[in-house]
Each structure stands twice: as C-alpha cells, then as structure tokens.
Image: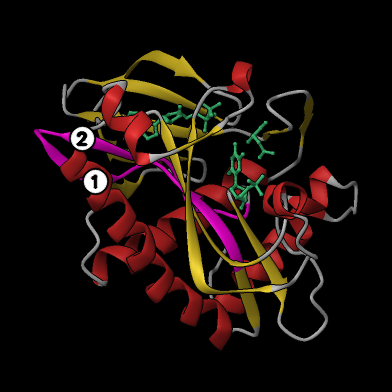
Amino acid sequence: MEKRDELYSGKAKSVYKTDDPGLFVLHFRNDTSAFDGTKVEKLMDKGKVNNIFNAFIMKKLEKAGIKTHFVKQLSETESLVKKLDMIPVECVVRNLAAGSICKRYGLPEGQEISPPTFEFFLKNDELHDPMINDYHIASFGWADPAHIEEMKKLTFKVNEVLKGLFEQANMLLVDYKLEFGLSDGELLLGDEFSPDGCRIWDAETRRKMDKDRFRQDLGDVIETYKEVGARLGIDFG
Ligand code: ADP
Ligand code: TMP
Ligand code: ASP
C-alpha cells in the first residue's frame, strides 16, 4: 500500500488517497480545534495519542460486531481505513447532561439522562452544526430512511460496548459523537473515537478527562487523554 496525494485536510486530521482506490490513510495531526474551528492550538503528542486511542476503540467495536472503516494502524499518527462516502451528520448519544444539551434545555451539568438520548446534528461549521431530525436527513437526501435507522441503532450499540468499558476503568462515558459513511452501499462507522469527540469524567470526582479540558482551558489536555488511555490499558509507547 502506497500513500498518495492529500485529498482533504480537516481541523484535526488529513485524508490521503492510496494506490488502492478503496482505501484512505487518516493522518491524526496535533491541531486541536473547538467552537467550530474558532479556537485552535497545536498540542504536542495529540495526533499520536488519538490515533492509538482510536485504533484500540475501533478494534473493540469490531469485536463486538460493529462494522467500522478501520483496517489497521500504519504508524504512530496514521491509520489505514476503507474509503467512505461520508453522511454529513453527527450522531450523538448522551448518558449524562453536559455541553449543548444543558444550554438548550436548561439542564444542570451531570444530570443523568435515562434512558440515554440521541441527537442528530448537521456537520457544517459555518452553520454551527445545527441540530436536525430524521425528516430533514431524509427530505434533503443526506441519507435514506433505512440508513437513518441503522445509524441510531449502531450509535446506541456503541454505548452498550463502551459505557461498560469506561465504567470498569472508573470513568463515566458522558456523551460521544459518531460519523458514518457508505462503502459499496454498506453503512460503516467512520472517522474516529477519541477523547476529542466524546466526554469522559472520572467516576468518583467527575474530573473532566476529554476535550472540554481544551475548550474550558483546564490544562493538562494530552496528559489527561493519556491517563484515560492508561486506565483502559492502552500502551502509547
Ligand atoms: P473536520 O472535517 O470536521 O474538520 P477532521 O479534521 O477530523 O474533521 O477531518 C477528517 C475528515 O475525514 C472528516 O471530514 C471526516 O468526515 C472524514 N472521514 C473520516 N473517515 C473517513 C473515511 N473512511 N472516508 C472518507 N472520509 C472520512
Ligand atoms: P455538544 O454538547 O457540544 O452538542 O457535543 C456533544 C458531543 O459531541 C461531545 O462529546 C462533543 C462531540 N462533538 C464533536 O465531537 N464535534 C462537534 O463538532 C460537536 C458539536 C460535538
Ligand atoms: N470539533 C468542533 C470544532 O473543532 C467542535 C468541538 O469539538 O467543540 O470546532
């Protein structure tokens, strides 16, 4: 497999073509962004930590029967993935109230959300990722009704697998965002699962251990990501 031209450079990762038209290389960079790209910084080791973290989680999800784009880790900061036609929506499941749901509905941070709730957002920084519903997705042709249902089912299934994994390591999986795409008509989990795209709290103290450390200037961002990984048994080398 040979890495070829860069296809797209996002806020945190770059996507490269390969000599196989069905495979892409994802390069996890140190660039860190929040608030739709308005707060940006380079954090040492972030690319490496998120790439290794993501590889660990994608393998766990595959083992649990969730089909993903992940093929293999190539280097400290790169992974090989199946090329997907990405569906431009973000799928969010929440176990505890934090972030935008608190502002939107006046919920106190940390309130249990039982049963866990699901939200779709349009992936569009210029529009500030507005919340959308199933009807918008189908009517505007972003995904068909069967794939909409499957995205919800799979996002909840990820919760079944990962909530327990974090709990065993004395952490709470507060919420997370997933992205899906199509490969030969099949829906696969794409993008990444890392502390950049979820909220994780220490189970006892509720200390924030995810990208809220960056958003809220709490410090020790990557040190804390590494601690989350270490508790899960991830070796960052
Ligand atoms: P953003 O685009 O939000 O700034 P990133 O910097 O993480 O995000 O860029 C990675 C981009 O690659 C995202 O737009 C994501 O949707 C896309 N992507 C993730 N996995 C795949 C894949 N398997 N095939 C094609 N595109 C992908
Ligand atoms: P929110 O509380 O800001 O709506 O975010 C919910 C979850 O989704 C949280 O874990 C952060 C994640 N997320 C992203 O990864 N990227 C995004 O662009 C947004 C808006 C949220
Ligand atoms: N990832 C988005 C951004 O970079 C939103 C966020 O995570 O806060 O702006």
Classify residue 200 as left or right of residue 86.
Answer: right
Q: Residue at x 44, y 16 (%)?
A: 8
**10 Å crowding of disc 1: few (<14), some (14-19), many (20+):** many
Inspect the magenta stretch and tell me whether residue 82 lies in it. no
**Residue in front for this viewpoint, 149 or 178:** 149
Q: Position of residue 232 (x, y in %)?
A: 55, 76
Residue at the far left in the pictured view = 184
Q: Residue at x 65, y 78 (%)?
A: 171
Q: Position of residue 181 (x, y in %)?
A: 28, 36
Q: Position of residue 223 (x, y in %)?
A: 77, 59
Reply above or below: 103 against 35.
Answer: below
Reply above or below: 153 against 138.
Answer: below
* For the residues bearing labels 1 and 2, Cβ distance under 8 angstroms: yes
Which quadrant does the N terminus fall into?
top left
Reply above or below: 213 against 74.
Answer: below
The residue beneath circle 2 is 182
Q: Label 2 sits on what residue type?
A: Leu
- Gap in Å between the C-alphas at discs 1 and 2? 6 Å
Q: Quadrant of residue 56?
A: bottom left
Classify residue 88 as left or right of residue 173.
Answer: left
Q: Which disc, if any, is residue 188?
A: 1
Confirm or reject: label 1 Cβ below 8 Å from ligand 1.
Answer: yes
Segment colored magenta = 174-195
Q: Label 1 sits on what residue type?
A: Leu
**Residue in front for this viewpoint, 112 or 70:** 112
Residue 208 visible at all? yes
**Residue in front for this viewpoint, 132 or 178:** 132
